[in-house]
Image (cartoon, rainbow, N blue to C red):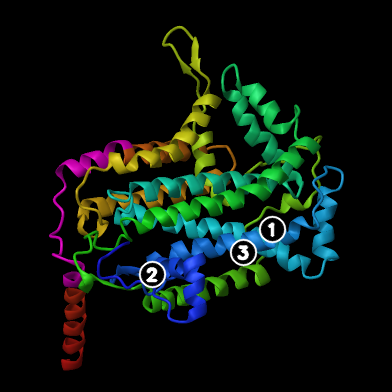
Amino acid sequence: MSFPWAEHYTPKHPLMKWMDEKLPLPRFVYNAVGGGYEVPRNLNYFWNFGVLAGLALTVQLVTGIILAMHYAANGAVAFDSVEHIMRDVNSGWLLRYAHANGASFFFIVVYIHIFRGLFFGSYKAPREMVWLLGIVIFLLMMATAFMGYVLPWGQMSFWGAQVITGLFAAIPVVGEPIQTWLLGGFAPGNAALNRFFSLHYLLPFVIAGVIILHIWALHIPGSSNPTGVEVKGPQDTVPFHPYYTAKDGFGVGVFFLIFALAVFFAPNAMGHPDNYIPANPMSTPAHIVPEWYFWPFYAILRAFTMDLTIPFTGIVLVPAKLLGVLAMFASILLLFFLPWIDTSPVRSGTYRPLFKKFFILLIVDVLILGYCGGAPAEEPWVMISQLAAAYYFAHFLIILPIIASFERPDPLPGSITEAVLAKSKHKTGETVAIAAE
């Protein structure tokens, strides 16, 4: 954010001056995250999750690189190499549990980050590119996580690869060749394992590159804020350091505390016990499910149980499997168009009373989809999935445009400072009233 009142780095020491002339890295860091980067003064703890997402990616990169030194991407020994890491490598159990749980924590942080953006309108102009790059990161995360889930080569790994790649077979004409190309054969085996391991190792670095673009795009218009009101002057901002580095530091401490509790006391709580059974192509698990962070989309996939046919003829236009695949991908791709679907001029849901109620319904709906995605593919879960999937699409395609057309928002503050001072006066008044009592 290039505010005219923002400070800029001017080195004083001769060595730092020379460094700044040859490679202006200190200046870049200072202007990007230091005292030279001004941010709105009213950011709350929901704005911590961007930093936490970067931290979670760092944990995955560090633990993943070390694990790759001991892992063997071969169907005959992949499962045993994971057990070797757990039993024989120094602190291997810690690295493996940190990596496995780190993926779940990465998704938890990113989901909160996304829903914060949905509520506070962070996808609206002038921050559309920030939002679009964020969705690209989310898609890359899903691809990376799926490929990583295959690598332990347990029962869920093998059959998850079989089921998920089998979705491409539903595409007419080119579907089966695509599935064969992805697997390197007609079923998951050594070729698929090598391909997935290679891409699983590569994609986190691609994610890191897109995150740099994401941050770059953010610095052009500047951070959004809970009021949705744009910065109007130096009174509305504070330097990122030390104010928000301290706030982020507290969030990082809480994150690592919860992460340590999961790794040390419940390392398998977010995994599936069948993945401790070696992959067996001749034994299909009773209930095949992906990792929990895919469950809402898996529920949308399974919600389509009937073919789309021409009435009274029985001619199938679109098979149910293909409808499910299209709906699953559409549920994610729909987020790309959100900046143009929601036409309300008010960004923050804080000042949109009707939007706020439907936003709560959306959260409940996604949680229901998640539960149904992890449940067996039987009634009543299939019917509930169908209703929840219908509401999910209705929220974005019908409800949001209708709300934007007639909702009467609450009055917006004149500036960020006005909102902060009003909130401060309200709290002071409450304190005085309590003291008087």
Earlier sequence position, callout 1 versus callout 2: 2
Judge from the rendering whether residue 294 lies leftward or rightward of residue 98; answer left or right: left
Q: CA distance from mark 1 to mark 2?
A: 29 Å
Residue at horizontal 19%, vertical 72%? 417
The residue that disc 1 covers is 64
Give percent across and percent down for residue 416: 21, 68
- Which type of secondary structure does the marked residue at label 2 adopt? helix
Q: Nearer the viewer, mark 1 or mark 2?
A: 1
Q: Cβ–Cβ below 8 Å for labels 3 and 2?
A: no
When the figure is inspected, residue 165 is found, relative to residue 69, above or below; the finding is above
Q: Amino acid at mark 1?
A: Gly
Looking at the image, which is closer to me, 238 or 312? 238
- Using the image, determine if residue 237 lies above or below residue 168: below
x, y percent for residue 320 = 52, 24
Q: Which residue is mark 2?
A: 45
Amino acid tagged 3: Val
Q: Residue 336's spot in the image, x, y percent? A: 39, 40
Kind of residue sitting beneath label 2: Tyr
* Image quadrant containing the C terminus: bottom left
Occupied quadrant, residue 100: bottom right
Distance of label 3 from label 1 (alpha carbons): 8 Å
Asked which quadrant contains residue 227, the reply is bottom left
Is residue 345 part of the magenta span, yes or no?
Answer: no
- Residue under label 3, please give it: 59
Which residues make up the magenta segment? 397-419
Query: Along the polypeptide, which appears first: circle 3 or circle 2?
Result: 2
Q: Secondary structure at mark 1?
A: helix
Mark 2 crowd level (few <14, some 14–19, many ≥20, 10 Å Cα) = few
For the residues labelled 1 and 2, say whether their Cβ atoms are less than 8 Å apart: no
Magenta stretch: residue 399 in it?
yes
- Binning the other alpha carbons within 10 Å of mark 1 as few (below 14), some (14 to 19) or many (20 upward) gives many
